[in-house]
Image (cartoon, helix red, strand yellow):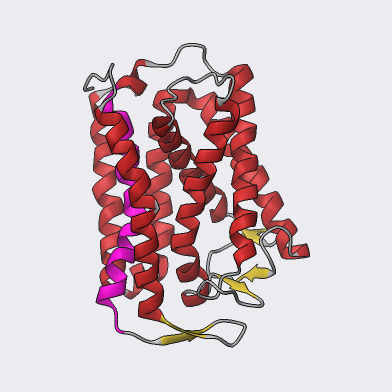
Amino acid sequence: MGNSRTTEWLLWGLIPVAAAVSIIQGLHVSNFVNLNGPSMLVIVSVIFVFIHGYRRYGWKDLSIFFLIAVVVGNFYENLSIATGFPFGNYHYSDQLGPKFIDAPYILNIAYFQMLYLSWTMAGAILDNYANRLQGSSLIALPLVASCIMVMWDMVIDPHMSTISGHWIWHQGGAYFGVPFVNYMGWFLCVLTMNILFALYLSKRGAKTAPAIVFTKSFWIQAVCLYLTWPLAFLIKGFCIPDATVMSQDGHLWHVRDLYQTAGLVAILTMCFVALLVFIKVASLKHAAES
């Protein structure tokens, strides 16, 4: 499975599927996709991530990464819902389905798919192709990967909360109804996940990196999948009628302003990081097309 031609085509095939979901959501032409688009994108993305991640880490190490995301994510989510730390005061509606205590199960795979993509892109930026991390990589890779993942949350959170009502911020917030502290808490949460995985790899990761990490397609696939996430927001800001929505602090927000801001943030964060990875991959000295 790892290096087969079928696997390669499957990975490339999932990217336009994810892009189609984002485009349809952005064009606002299907009520079903408008409501369920993010969950649909999570499902496509997590299938991609398990296949893509297996090629580098194998099932054991990838499963450890997934387990870390599930345990740490649920811990911080339920802690914050109960106490307000570290994200702020909020709760989840019933739109995302069944919950573990107070946090929807689908969050586990949503966390994991973006955690893996952010980790992979950070590795490319830092020229880190090893599976067994050592030295400064134990800190640098988790820090950069966590920043990349917070970029994603900056793009999607106002849509997911203020507009769609998947979760509700009790006191609203300055960033289109999302509080500043949410992003500090989010960084803490994903940094915890990334550091734990880095420590695991420092002891248990394979000493020799698989040949797949020295192929350009391996990295380009991850970047392309990552870029399907901001696509909907780049389109929405110009394709949907304007309206207003009120956050819990009584502040009225223009929907078009929210989406255009999300698109601008995406260009200057997610798309910029993707550009850096493309540049790094283009100069990958030992690249050989798979």
Q: Main secondary structure of the magenta part?
A: helix
Viewer-closest of 49 and 216: 216
Q: Quadrant of residue 39?
A: bottom left
Viewer-closest of 211 and 33: 211
Q: How many marks?
A: 0
Q: Residue furthest right?
A: 83
Viewer-closest of 23 and 126: 126
Let me know if residue 29 appears in the view.
no
Question: In the rendered image of this protein, does residue 127 appear above or below residue 277?
Answer: above
Q: What residue is shown at x 42% (from left), y 61% (from top)?
A: 38
State the extent of the magenta-drawn residues as a range.
Answer: 215-241
Magenta stretch holds residue 219? yes
Question: In the rendered image of this protein, does residue 45 appear above or below residue 21?
Answer: above
Q: Where does residue 155 sit, x and y in percent of width and height? A: 43, 61
Q: What residue is shown at x 30% (from left), y 64% (from top)?
A: 234
Let me know if residue 204 appears in the view.
yes
Position of residue 19 in the picture relative to residue 162 (left or right): left
Q: Where does residue 34 sit, x and y in percent of width and height? A: 36, 71
Position of residue 193 in the picture relative to residue 160 (left or right): right
